[in-house]
Image: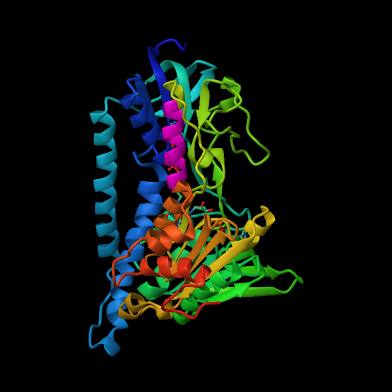
Amino acid sequence: MVVGDIATGTDVLVIGAGPGGYVAAIRAAQLDLDVTLVEKDAYGGTCLNHGCIPSKALVSATDVAHEAREAEHMGVHADPAIDMAGMTAWKDGVVDQLTTGVERLCKGNGVNLVDGTAEFADENTARVAHGGEGQGSESIEFEHAVVATGSRPVELPALPFDGDLILSSRHALALESVPDELLVVGAGYIGMELATVFAKAGSDVTVVEALDQALPGYEADVTRVVTQRAKSLGVDFHFEEAAADWEEREEGLTVVTEGEDGTVSEYEATKALVAVGREPVTDTVDLDAAGVETDENGFVPTDDRARTNVDHVFAVGDVAGEPMLAHEGMKAGEVAAEVIAGEPAALDQQAIPAAVFTDPEIGTVGLTESEAEDAGFSPVVGELPLRASGRALTHDDTDGFVRIVADETDGFVLGAQIVSPEASELIAEVGLAIEMGATLEDLVATVHTHPTLSEAVMEAAANAMGQAIHTLNR
Ligand code: FAD
Ligand code: NAD
C-alpha cells in the first residue's frame, strides 16, 4: 500500500462501468456479494456515451428528416432542415438519461461506486487513483475482480486523430455542424452506419475501404442491399483502397489512398472519419501485476465462464475480444457475476445476434448456409423477398429479404440473415428459436400478427418447408 492510501476491501472489484462492467456489478450485488465498481470516465462506457446509443440517436433523427424529405409520392410534402447542434443536444439528453439511470441502478442495487482509475497492484489488490489534482487514491483488496475496461478506436499511424480534421467515431458523434464533404475510412460497422447518418444529414460522403466489399464478414448479397441503398443516398464507394496519408488544405484535407496494385488516389474532404476497428484497453489497468495474460492482439483470453488465466480474475466485454458487441458484454458480465457467486453459469448461448443499423438494417444470428455446411449440417434455406411483404410495402421499404437456415434432417433452425427495416428487432425471434431448439415447423405454426414485418420470418420458414403462401416455393 502507498503511504496515504485509504484501504478498503470488497468481494468483487469491477473495473470499468460499460455494459460489461455495470451488468456484472449489478448482478453480483443482486447475488448478495459486496461489490465495488470503479469507473474513470462516465457510467455506461463507450456504449452509452460514445457508441451504440449516440449513434442510434443520430440514425433515428436523420431518418426522420430523410423519410419526410422523400415522402412526396406518399402525399407528404415537407422540407426538413437539419440543425446539427440541436440534434446533438437532443442526443446528449438521451445519453444523460441513460447514464444517470445506470448510476441509479447501481446504487439502488447496493453497488459501491468509486470514481477513478483502477490499476492492479498484485493478485488481490488494486490501487484507484481518483481523478484530478489532490483527489488522492485508495487501495482496494478484492476476492474476485472483473476486468471490463473495454476498447478504443484503432488509430492509423498515417492518419492520427486530431478531433478537427481527422475524427474518430467519438468525435463524429459530437459534431455541431454537418461537414460539407465527409471522407469515411473503413466500411465496417461504424463506417457504414455513420456514412448513412451523414449522407442523410446532407454531407457529400465518400467511403474508402481496403477490402472488396462493405461490412466484410457478412455475405455479399446481404451487404449488396445496404451498399446500393447508401449509393442511392449519394455515398461514393471506393473499394480495395487503403488510406495511406493525408495533407491539410485551406478548408479541410486531402486523404491519399493506395490500391492493391499500387495505384494512388486522392480525395478532398472537409473532414475524415477513420473507423478501421477497435483495440482493447489494457494499458490503464496493469494486468501484469495481477498475472493476467493477453493474446498477441492485446485481448484477454477467457474461458466459457469469463475467467482469465488467473482463477479469481474475470474479463468481460470488448477487452475479452470478439464479438465486440454490447449485448455480448452484458451477457458475459452476468455470467462472471453468477460464477463468482458460485452458481453453475456459463457462456453457453447457442448463438449471439448482430445488427447493423444501416438503411435498411441488417440482422443476423447463428449460421449462414455455407457455415452450416462446413459444420456438417445438411442445410435447407427459405427466403422471403421483402417486396412480398405487405407491411414492407406500407413502409415504402421493400429492398431486402428474410432468410432462414435450418437443418433439413430434423428442421432445427440454425440461423437467419435479415436485411429489412427493423431487422435488428426481427432477428430476436430467430435467436429465441435457435436458443430453444425450435424447428421450422414451430416458426410456421406460430401465428404472427398481420400486417407485420415479422410475418416474413414465418413465411421464410414456410418457404424452407415448401409451404410458403406469399412467395413461390423453391
Ligand atoms: P466499454 O463500453 O468501452 O466500457 C469500458 C469502461 O471502462 C469505460 O467507461 C472506461 O472509461 C472504463 N475504464 C477503462 N479502464 C479503466 C480503469 N483502469 N479504471 C476504471 N475504469 C476504466 N455494440 C452493439 O452491440 N450495438 C451497437 O449498435 C453498437 N454501436 C456502436 C457504435 C459505435 C460508434 C461504437 C464505437 C461502438 C458500438 N458498439 C455497439 C460496441 C459497444 O459500444 C461495445 O461493444 C461496448 O461498449 C463494450 O462494452 P464494455 O463494457 O466492454 O466496454
Ligand atoms: P470494423 O472492423 O467493423 O470495420 C473496419 C473496416 O475498416 C474493415 O472493413 C477494414 O477492412 C477497413 N480498413 C482497415 N484499415 C483500413 C485502411 N487503412 N483504409 C481503408 N479501410 C481500412 O470496425 P469499426 O467499424 O471501427 O467498428 C469497430 C467495432 O465496433 C465493430 O467490430 C463492432 O464490434 C463494434 N460496433 C458495432 C456496431 C453494431 O453492433 N451495430 C456498430 C458500431 C460498432
Instruction: Tell whether position 6 is magenta.
Output: no
Q: Which residues are magenta?
A: 326-338
Number of numbered markers: 0
The spot of residue 26 in percent (x, y) is 33, 31
Q: Residue at x 57, y 42 (%)?
A: 321
Q: Is residue 253 left or right of residue 130?
A: right
Q: Relative to 262, say whether 8 is above or below.
A: above
Question: Which of 353 and 24 lies nearest the eye of the viewer?
Answer: 353
Quadrant of the rendered structure where residue 471 is?
bottom left
Question: Which of 310 and 36 lies nearest the eye of the viewer?
Answer: 310
Q: Is residue 401 left or right of residue 116?
A: right
Instruction: Tell whether position 327 is magenta.
Output: yes
The spot of residue 87 in percent (x, y) is 28, 63
The spot of residue 22 in percent (x, y) is 37, 35
The spot of residue 159 in percent (x, y) is 59, 58
Q: Is residue 204 left or right of residue 322?
A: left
Q: Is residue 157 left or right of residue 398?
A: right
Res. 87 in view: yes
Q: Residue at x 23, y 30 (%)?
A: 108
What is the magenta segment's predominant secondary structure?
helix
Quarter of the rendering occupied by the C terminus: bottom right
Q: Quadrant of ligand 1?
A: top left
Q: Residue at x 47, y 66 (%)?
A: 461
Quadrant of the rendered structure where residue 193 is?
bottom left
Q: Residue furthest right?
A: 261
Q: Relative to 32, say whether 248 is above or below.
A: below
Q: Residue at x 27, y 69 (%)?
A: 83
Res. 118 in view: no
